[in-house]
Amino acid sequence: SQQGEEDPQALSIQEGENATMNCSYKTSINNLQWYRQNSGRGLVHLILIRSNEREKHSGRLRVTLDTSKKSSSLLITASRAADTASYFCAPQPGYSSASKIIFGSGTRLSIRP
Amino acid sequence: GAVVSQHPSRVICKSGTSVKIECRSLDFQATTMFWYRQFPKQSLMLMATSNEGSKATYEQGVEKDKFLINHASLTLSTLTVTSAHPEDSSFYICSASARLGTSGSDEQYFGPGTRLTVT
């Protein structure tokens, strides 16, 4: 297992703007996942990107992965109030999802109306 | 997609009593389940890894006699907080990983969480 570190810790933007958050990790991975957590709720899986992929899209989400820099970014385009949440990355080294996830502090995203 | 449920969603108990929290994978078999604890405004802290039919593996600093974990079947893991104290009040979240080939992906699926308040 390994821990991802999200950056920035907090981000406040105007509704409609794009939000970018980054994740760094230390050892090689098989895949990296991004999760969202609304206040007081469980985690919602957003997107999984495999180590042989460089970019992946899902709706308004765009994830990039640079294995040479051991970093990933999550871009949310045309942000909405409902995007206000904490976002976590989860780098997974193994080929099985049974690899435990050690969460970092996350990025707290606030969307201003 | 794969769904993980937790029961109860909220529980209030008196200090000294024990509380059981259930985590179920509803439409897939979970060989491994994980238990996390989250205090207000903090990140999720992994407590233990639970494998079906074997003893749980606890993270450093987590008391195995206080947080009893049972993973009796491929769809159910339980966490029992024994002799609960106010400092055990927290948000407990489980996640489940699918046996490869069952859910068709290798994501981990998280439950909605259980808020425990010990008075």
Image (cartoon, rainbow, N blue to C red):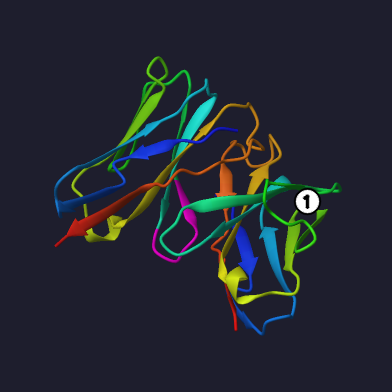
- The residue sitting at 63% across, 65% down in the picture is B6
Whether residue A4 appears in this view of the structure is: yes
- The residue sitting at 74% across, 80% down in the picture is B17
Q: Which residues are magenta?
A: A38-45
Q: Is residue A94 above or below residue A87?
A: above
Confirm whether the magenta stretch covers residue A43: yes
SS for callout 1: loop
Whether residue B30 appears in this view of the structure is: no
Horizontal relation, residue B20 to residue B72: left or right: left
Quadrant position of residue A110:
bottom left
Which residue sits furthest right? B53
Percent across and percent down for residue A64 are: 34, 27
Label 1 Cα crowd, 10 Å radius (few <14 / some 14-19 / many 20+): many
- The residue sitting at 47% across, 18% down in the picture is A52
* Residue at the spot of label 1: B74
- The residue sitting at 61% across, 37% down in the picture is B104
Amino acid on which the number 1 mark rests in the picture: Leu
